[in-house]
């Protein structure tokens, strides 16, 4: 039996964090790639095309195959996405992001429409964290860190 792994997503200026259990059975390559890339930090932003989504662009491009990929997400799902250079309007450089969803109205999307994300973790004990996410529509970007728990 595998040992359960978790990551923690933390708003640095809010002193608020949420743990997330990795879904290693459903998305093993994504879990390994994200785990190996941690810790990462930067500015988290609200996903304007996706509804109730917040995301962090990773400092380095990480490529993994699609696994456990969906456009149908729930509150607390944590996803991963790599966007290739030139794959859509205004995408001049490739990038990878970790994104999470804080309410029931989210559909991961780009300007062209819905885009599947690899759901690789699930937030828990996250009420205060999700409340900060809800405020980001009005308050804007926030400093964030994702680390191994």
Image (tube, helix red, strand yellow):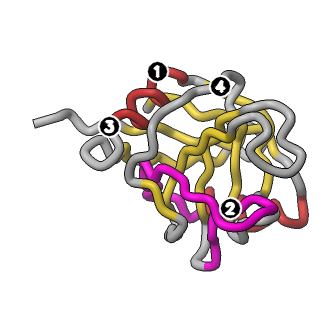
Q: Which residue is mark 4?
A: 61
Q: Is label 1 or label 3 in front?
A: 3
Secondary structure of the residue carrying tag 1 is helix
Drawn side of residue 145 relative to residue 68, left or right: right
State the separation of the CA atoms marked 3 and 2: 23 Å
Q: CA distance from mark 1 to mark 4?
A: 13 Å
Residue 61, image x, y percentages: 65, 25
- How many neighbours does mark 4 have within 10 angstroms: few (below 14), some (14-19), or many (20 or more)? some
Q: Rounded to the nearest whole Å, what is the CA distance between mark 2 and mark 4?
A: 21 Å
Of 62 and 76, nearer the camera is 62
Question: Dot 3, how many residues are within 10 Å of its Cα: few (below 14), some (14-19), or many (20+)?
Answer: some
Residue at mark 2: 53
Query: Does dot 2 land on a helix, a strand or a loop?
Result: strand
- Within the magenta stretch, is there residue 111? yes
Q: Which residue sits furthest front?
A: 86
Q: Nearer the viewer, mark 3 or mark 2?
A: 3
Label 1 with label 3: CB-CB less than 8 Å? no
Q: Residue at x 58, y 27 (%)?
A: 62
Gap between marks 2 and 1, in whole Å?
24 Å
Looking at marks 2 and 4 on the same chain, the residue that comes earlier in the sequence is marked by 2
Q: Which residues are magenta?
A: 105-127
Task: State which mark lies toward you, 1 or 4.
Answer: 4
Label 3: state its secondary structure: helix
From where the camera sits, is residue 54 visible? yes
- In x, y percent, where is residue 55? 69, 49
Tell me residue 64's x, y (percent): 48, 33
Can residue 128 be seen in this snapshot? no
Residue holding disc 1: 36
């Amino acid at each position: 039996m595998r040992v359960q792994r978790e990551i923690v997503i933390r708003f640095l200026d809010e002193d608020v964090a949420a743990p997330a259990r990795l879904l290693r059975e459903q998305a093993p390559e994504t879990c390994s790639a994200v785990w190996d890339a941690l810790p990462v930090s930067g500015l988290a932003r609200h996903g304007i095309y996706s509804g109730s989504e917040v995301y962090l662009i990773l400092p380095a491009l990480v490529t993994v195959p699609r696994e456990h990929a969906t456009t149908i997400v729930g509150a607390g799902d944590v996803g991963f996405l790599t966007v290739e250079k030139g794959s859509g309007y205004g995408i001049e450089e490739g990038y990878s992001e970790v994104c999470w969803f804080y309410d029931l109205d989210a559909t991961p999307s780009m300007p062209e429409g819905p885009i599947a994300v690899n759901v690789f973790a699930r937030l828990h004990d996250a009420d205060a964290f999700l409340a900060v996410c809800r405020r980001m529509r009005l308050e804007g970007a926030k400093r964030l860190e994702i680390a191994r728990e």
